[in-house]
Image (cartoon, helix red, strand yellow):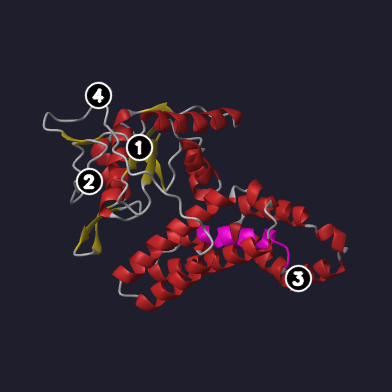
Amino acid sequence: MRKKKLLFLFFFMPTFLMANDIMFNRLKRLYNHNISRCLEVSKSYIELFPDQPAPYYFASISYRDKSEWSRTLRGKYLNLNRCVGYAVKFEATDNQEIAEEVLWHNVKKDIESRATIAIEELEAGKQFGMAKLLSIRLAGLIEETEIPVIEDKTIVAEVKSYPEISNVSSNAIFVDAGSNVKFYGLATGREIVSSADLPGERELLRLVNEERLKKGQVTLVWDEDLARAARYHSYDLATQNYFNHSSYDRKNGELVKVGGTFDRIKRFYDKSFVNSENIAAGNKDAIATYNQWYTSKGHYENMFNPDSRVVGIGVFYDPNSPFGYYWTMCTAK
């Protein structure tokens, strides 16, 4: 009954009131408060106004977020398949006005990364039919995308001491920023991976804290142990070729889970309760990573969790990896 009433109102509302900016603002409010409701209204708008891009955009990012909450691989596939489909429709209908406002380039990159990893997970799980269908759908989104060329240059690791590290034993394992040695099993906490971009890590922290101040929140304080956990995970993502919060080893071409997110972080940091982790891939600069997380509801909430007090950020670069640059941010209370 409620849906019928909603459609009735839509049909009798003057057409000029249904301008894309009005739809966009309403859907944005719904997305920030209730993603399921946002998705429902977006679909109603699409039925009535198939040429308007705003509902396609919000349907796409709503399904993207639902994929992150999926408890099964099939659920992740179904949500990402719909997400990519609506993303294709958004690009076909938008005149770049909305794309510029929502930083679509970063949102699209995030969707592509999630779908690519899901395809790999489906293939690892022998779900070849679903993997093929999602691959075909994804090709429709990225076929017009210019693939950036990442310069193949050696990153020289800075030789430095680590006075802020509190729980590293004398037999610590040091890995420089240009290494491709793989770690196997869950991290021990002795690993120290050199950052590929120390200024970039601090710049990302600056961007997050600048926005937290605007929101009246306390700024995050850097913790080197959390940074070690973050750098380790960025390194592992690149060298083991996967994209997930949990830790995996690649054995005989297949991914094998070796530990959970917080189990890994606790190997490096045990001073307080660890409450979140963000990951991103493909961004060279801190601002691009920040913008990508800013436009993703779950990542946004992690950056601006009012309960967080400390943070560690790690970036690693591997020119031979699928995405080149990998970023991880860990926070704790």
Which secondary structure class fits the magenta region best?
helix
Image quadrant for the N terminus? bottom right
Magenta region:
51-65
Residue 116 lies left or right of residue 103; in this view the side is left
What kind of residue is marked 3?
Leu
Give the Cα distance between marks 2 and 1: 16 Å
Q: Is residue 183 above or below residue 88?
A: above
Q: Secondary structure at mark 2?
A: loop
Residue plotted at (33% across, 42% down)? 317
Query: Of tags 2 and 3, which is closer to the observer?
Result: 2
Mark carried by residue 180 = 2
Residue under label 4: 162
* Rendered view: 136 above or below 193: below
Q: Amino acid at mark 2?
A: Asn
Count neighbours of disc 2 (C-alpha within 10 A) and say few if under 14, some if 14 to 19, many if 20 or more: some
The three-letter code of the residue at mark 1 reads Gly
Q: Which quarter of the image is occupied by the C terminus?
A: top left
Q: CA distance from mark 3 to mark 4?
A: 60 Å
Q: Secondary structure at mark 3?
A: helix
Q: Earlier in the sequence, mark 4 or mark 1?
A: 4
Q: Residue furthest bottom?
A: 129
Q: Nearer the viewer, mark 2 or mark 1?
A: 2
Callout 3–callout 1 Cβ contact below 8 Å: no
Which residue sits at x=24%, y=65%?
254
The residue lying furthest to the left in this view is 171
Residue in front for this viewpoint, 120 or 92: 92
Q: Quadrant of residue 156?
A: top left
